[in-house]
Amino acid sequence: MFVTDIRKDFYEVVANQRVALLVAADIDALCACKILQALFHCDHIQYTLVPVIGWQDLSTAFLEHKEQIKLLIKQDDDLGVPSYDDIFRDDEEEDDGSGNDSDEGSEPSGKRRRFDEVRSISRRCRKDFLRREILFDYEQFEFHGTSAAMMFFELAWVLTKDTKDMLWWAIIGLTDQQIHDKITHMKYVTDVATMQRHVSRHNHRNEDEENSLSIDCMRISFEYDLRLSLYQHWSLYESICNSCYTSSSFKLWTLNGQKKLREFLADMGLPLKQVKQKYTSMDMSIKENLRDVIEESSNKFGMKEIRIQTFGVHFGFQNRFLASDMVHATAALLESTEKEESDIAHNFIKALDSLSRGNLDRLHVGIDHAKRKLLAIQQTVASCICTNLILSQGPFLYCYLMEGTPDVKLFSKPLALTLLCKYLLKAFVHSTRNKRCKLLPLIMAAPKDVEKGTVIVAGIPPESETSDKKNFFGRAFEKAAESTSSRTLHDHFDTSIIELKTEDRSKFLDALITLLS
């Protein structure tokens, strides 16, 4: 595995020198950064932290800090790479130029035998190259394997330096992949089981009286909790209305959906006054059995997956958060569009700090931002469906947010736009009667920079329980831009998100339709 391979080399490279950390601005990378920072602090390693939001930033940061950047590779790796001449030698050059085999019998000479072996290696190398090239064509823009945060936690575990804080950050990184549809459900469940074993190990290791009674103790627990966003920091009613799963299932943008919601609340037998006040203010007698009551009523209304495997954490005796709460809050801080918070590096540091249990005030600010973001997403989803903004373009669905749309500035950010795409597609699948549309991916565009005349475009795969989450829009966007000479910027690490000149949008879209038909 990666972590066991780099264990020795990792510390050989970083010891006694200053290291540059170039960190992508997404939640999983933030969590991986926190774990790596903690490891550096353990061994008093100096480092420079540089947030990067795209390939241009990465290139600039690399040039500025290239003296601090090292390549981690095992010294004893035997890559077995043939020489250039061995691979590209012409097949006609089968011997030393005489055109004849050795005179000693039918067996080839030692030189000929050696070349046959080399040519065999050459053929295998070419096949491997072609195989890699094919995989590159189809899988280069995919999220594969374990999250970065989980990978660095495994490294900390191998080094016997892992802590509960590191474990919690790894869980947040995994949850980010689930919320933003970067991994399949099966992969998520498998990784949850891995994290659950680490949680059990840490809980068993720290079951001492001092830790359990400390006012600033930290307790992580595995839970089957509700698929309701931020419900413990909101009112239950608002959470149901603004969570993707329940909002789509009830079709809350319709009058019939509102009626179903009222029937659902009545079926649970919860007083409306209790449901509409903050969760923390609800009667304890109601909260004790709330999850069971909601699950029972949800099954009657066809929402049989209202519960999901996740993790929760207690900081002290009062502060409790789910991993999904942390993801939403951190993402909202990272992509804040507040006027005083427009600086990317400033937002990055604030989001990074919110992951520390010593900065709960900042985390609560992020939760408030996340509530406004989820409200904006649900209002935009309802508007798009009710005004028929989602169009079938043949091989995909398409939606464009016009300039002047409420909260449109929020969706100029990649994480917010991706989450809007996910919610919108799920809602559309629940609302449409067209069976073919239920199998189509979605492309969405929103204004990026009005002054520069650019839009941001994102594409996501079809909404399906069996979806493998593979997203092929990255290569399609490149091909469509090339064929139309559209002015595009492919700067995001997630290549299914690009920036495009507004006046090139129509011809770019036509090229995509032709390409994917």
Image: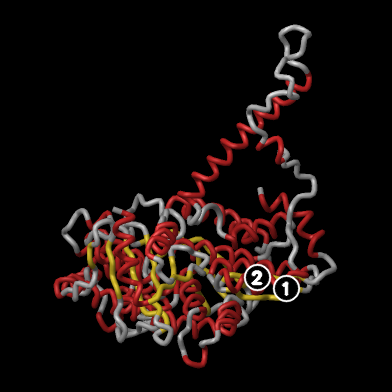
- Amino acid residing under circle 1: His
Q: Is residue 62 visible?
A: yes
Residue 323 percent across, percent down from the top left: 50, 68
- Mark nearer the N terminus (2 vs 1): 2
Query: Is residue 260 found left or right of 404 in the rendered image?
Result: left
Residue 378 percent across, percent down from the top left: 30, 76
Which mark, residue 262? none
Q: Which quadrant would residue 276 be assigned to in this image?
A: bottom left
Q: Are marks 2 and 1 in contact (CB under 8 Å)?
A: yes
- Which residue does the numbered mark 2 point to in the structure image? 22
SS class of the residue under badge 2? strand
Query: Is residue 48 found left or right of 313 in the rendered image?
Result: right
Which of the two residues, 265 or 511, is positioned nearer the viewer here?
511
- Amino acid residing under circle 2: Leu
Which of the two residues, 356 or 426, is positioned nearer the viewer here?
426
Residue 411 percent across, percent down from the top left: 39, 78
SS class of the residue under badge 1? loop
- Which residue does the numbered mark 1 point to in the structure image? 65
